[in-house]
Image (cartoon, rainbow, N blue to C red):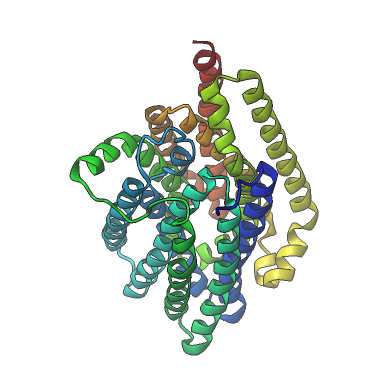
Amino acid sequence: MKKKQLSIIENLIWNSAGSFTYLICQWLLTWIIVVHSKDLGNAGNLALAISITNIFFNLACFNIRPYLVSDLKQCYRSEQYSAFRLFTCLASLILCLIYTCMFGYTMDQIICVMLYMVFKLGEAWVDLLHGFEQRKMRMDIGGISLFIRGILSVLSFMAGVRFSGSVNTGIIFMTVCTWSFIFLYDMPQARKFEKIAPVFTKETIKKMLIEFLPLTIGGVLSSLGPSLPRQFLEAEQGSKVLGIYSTVATPAVFVQVAATYVFNPVLTEFASLYQRGEKRRFLKLLFKISFFLLAVSGASLVGGAVLGQWGLTFLYGKRIGAHADLFLPVIIFTCLNAMSWFLWSILIIFRELKALLVINVIGVIMCILIMFPLISKYGMQGVNDTLILYTCVLLVLMAVLVGRDIKCKFDR
């Protein structure tokens, strides 16, 4: 007999506990390299791999999870979602290799990027499985998976680095361990709720490609925007400088991702309220989540201002603590980005897939136009300036569209 559905609060707690653990463990990968390596170029290579694969991770996911968890009428079967995810994972792996080879990176950097991409494909596959479970209000399974995979990733990565002194070996160890856990735990658990064996049909793949393509291109562009300034910084000033910037920026990502732990579990509730036309309850929930995001942002800015330099010095040492002036602007960007992720998810529930594509095209064009002069003149601080301005543009456009849709779609 299957366990009954969990409440929103229970799902939130399980998801937050697992996701926080996983996030901390992913940050520890950077910490391990910075602390145990005399050459910051190693941290730069890892940061480059993370930055590039984030683009193609979005392509692998095709950004369909908000669509999936709000697909309460099951427009597509679970077997079709599985087949489509395998198709996009293979495509993203090939495109990542082509993209990496185009930019003249060293062979060591290319290998690092591709190994990390294989690891990220594990995240993409398990994200689909957790989406099925979320639709059934059983995010405890995903929380447990995230917790254990996070611990495994750190231990295996550290073992690989200590065994060989190579970042690439560490990634191989980490990939083998986490993929093994997905096969042994996540897939059997997901089968309790859905049929996950992929069923490939040319017609369905084509239909899903056409329907989700605007969303996916928009998602890739939303990753490309934050990634381009970092890649330009590496090209302009080298991997060591990128290593410094990424090390300073990594702790601030906790703010951004923590925000998603709160609104991700309620996306199914938003979809349900929208389908039932319950505008008042929809708005009430929307204001609650928005207020929480603002509160977290305010607390993070105060904490960053007071503890930023001490915290960076404590975690990484004086050579990173000397760049604490970068930390507060990074927090501002991550807070703004968390808010844009929330509005992004709401617009997917409203099925504004083409509009999201247009918004992200505008954002990336603006990002490209301003990043060259800002980074050339201000270096690492120029990356922050670019990202803040870029995200503000996205936020304004999304907020206007959400307001219009709430007025029109509920009152039609």
In the displayed orientation, state which residue is furthest to the top: 412
The residue at the point 36 percent across, 49 percent down is 59
Q: Is residue 240 left or right of residue 218?
A: right
In the displayed orientation, state which residue is furthest to the front: 1
Please state which of residues 397 and 213 is positioned toward the viewer in this rendering: 213
Number of on-image labels? 0
Residue 391 in sight here: yes
In the displayed orientation, state which residue is furthest to the bottom: 163
Q: Is residue 132 left or right of residue 212?
A: right
| Displayed quadrant of residue 267 | top right
The residue at the point 51 percent across, 33 percent down is 394
From the top left corner, tell me how far across and down residue 196 is, in percent. Answer: 37, 54
Residue 247 in sight here: no
The residue at the point 36 percent across, 41 percent down is 216
Please state which of residues 85 and 378 is positioned toward the viewer in this rendering: 85
Position of 179 relative to 351 (above/below): below
The residue at the point 53 percent across, 47 percent down is 134
From the top left corner, tell me how far across and down residue 265 is, in percent. Answer: 60, 43
From the top left corner, tell me how far across and down residue 238 is, in percent. Answer: 45, 65
Q: Is residue 104 left or right of residue 254?
A: left
Which quadrant does the N terminus fall into?
bottom right
Position of 351 relative to 319 (above/below): above
From the top left corner, tell me how far across and down residue 220 is, in percent. Answer: 39, 45
